[in-house]
Amino acid sequence: MKLQVPVLLVAWFGVLGCVQAEFFTSIGHMTDLIYAEKDLVQSLKEYILVEEAKLSKIKSWASKMEALTSKSAADPEGYLAHPVNAYKLVKRLNTEWSTLEDLVLQDSAAGFIANLSVQRQFFPTDEDETGAAKALMRLQDTYKLDPDTISKGELPGTKYEAVMSADDCFGMGRSAYNEGDYYHTVLWMEQVLKQLDAGEEAVTTKAQVLDYLSYAVFQLGDVRRALELTRRLLSLDPSHERAGGNLRYFEQLLEEERGKMASNQTEAGQAPQDSIYERPADYLPERDVYESLCRGEGVKLTPKRQKRLFCRYHDGNRTPQLLIAPFKEEDEWDSPHIVRYYDVMSDEEIQRIKEIAKPKLARATVRDPKTGVLTVASYRVSKSSWLEEDDDPVVARVNRRMQHITGLTVKTAELLQVANYGMGGQYEPHFDFSRRPFDSGLKTEGNRLATFLNYNDEQDVFKHLGTGNRVATFLNYMSDVEAGGATVFPDLGAAIWPKKGTAVFWYNLLRSGEGDYRTRHAACPVLVGCKWVSNKWFHERGQEFLRPCGSTEVD
């Protein structure tokens, strides 16, 4: 049989080949997988039709042979007395049964398998599955969602229903376990047990779940519960060799702890009765503040501050291009001054920029503060691309518009960066400007100590550009986001929510050229939706007369 690969399938290979692996870091690229899977389903249906046609022929032959043999077996000699019957019997056994054999042995799956084999090389990898699982756990932590809520798909702003089976939840727990994340292992394995206890059918067995769960709670220091779960596991599978060894080990540990127990102390390793475990602390000092702002909590927009925020029409200090059609400007924060502009980009411009950027999207990187080398990082989950004015007239038009609005020159600015966030896509708290050694004394007290230690030896990452530091950030929101995805400033207690077609602008540097450390900001994980942004980073050079220096260090 000649193998045929559909033209549509080949076309999608061209798209997928450009973005192999790390699908989870861009929802825009994950949409390609939808079409690839749709094409694969079509190929599978074609295979089923061929199989059904083949089976129909075999069934028809079997029915005909059954009727014929019933008659011939009832009176073999009488049947064969007719010479035609005798001839046809010899012919059937010599020729026709061989033809049937060829039909049965015909491999009608070859075409489908060929398609699947070719397409598999563009499938998500183990890294993608782990990244997707981590993304769900990130959303779980940031937005304080329990596994049951996620499993039922009860998320705000969702357009489609989606539920997780016990097997799906087991996959989440196993991914966490393989990463040494026992906190989330416990949460998800408990969810699997809950769904299995409710009678849900699954490939995963309770014994498998208890095996992971008992060891995970042991790693969290809860020896007593680990022992209890191991006993339950052995009641289901008495021959479980590892569980038997663990049981003896846990019993020994508890016995040793009882011997060391002081008169007024509880046993070491004994967890609270509700067996609720605390989320482990991590590397980010402002984690709680950051995540609270992402949830819309802890915003420090007091009535007094709110009175200082206004809306106005902005003509860029009487820029000729904006006199007739000024932009609507809204204050988002008073100090440092953060403003939002409305109707900065049209839907048509946004769509065109996304079309240009999508084939160029690559995993977003960060600069190592010690070496200045670009590298990927778990705290930045998105894909980005850089667009030049020669790529399309719309890029040049948007660049000019940003120049008119800000009053800054784009001649020394970086290229237009377009970013698309993936599952739970985020960019944890960071500065847009380069923190150079002479900045290090500006903020060293209180919780700034950790930051100081991080950037004490940081390279001047923009030195090679010869355009100075990033003086300002202009951030375009190119999509609405159903839930999550805010831009937050932990030091300020400010949260700015995406609105398609709007843009926010702030200065990263004080007029003295020193970094404004209050502008440390983050892109919150996208809970529901697909977040697209583009941004322009303006640099110091060329702005000397457009934004004059201040007379003091803190101007």
Image (spheres, rainbow, N blue to C red):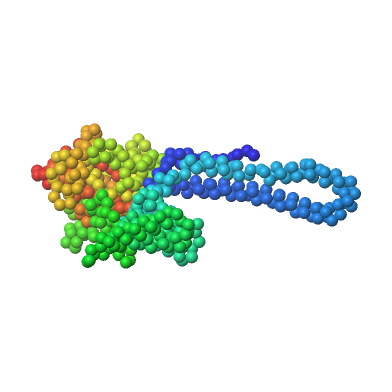
The residue shown at (19%, 63%) is 303
Determine if residue 315 is in view.
no
333 or 492, which lies in front? 492
Determine if residue 66 is in view.
yes
The residue shown at (42%, 41%) is 19
Which quadrant of the rendered structure holds the N terminus? top right
Residue 255 % position (x, y): 32, 61
Position of residue 171 in the picture relative to residue 3 (left or right): left
Residue 381 % position (x, y): 34, 47
The residue shown at (33%, 39%) is 386
Q: Residue furthest left?
A: 551
Q: Quick check: 153 above or below 53?
A: below
Q: How many marks?
A: 0
Residue 179 % position (x, y): 36, 49
The residue shown at (89%, 46%) is 83
Residue 272 % position (x, y): 30, 65
Q: Quadrant of residue 292?
A: bottom left
Q: Residue furthest front?
A: 259
Q: Quadrant of residue 402?
A: top left
Q: Quick check: 126 above or below 330?
A: above
325 or 85, which lies in front? 85
Q: Quadrant of residue 287?
A: bottom left
455 or 26, which lies in front? 455
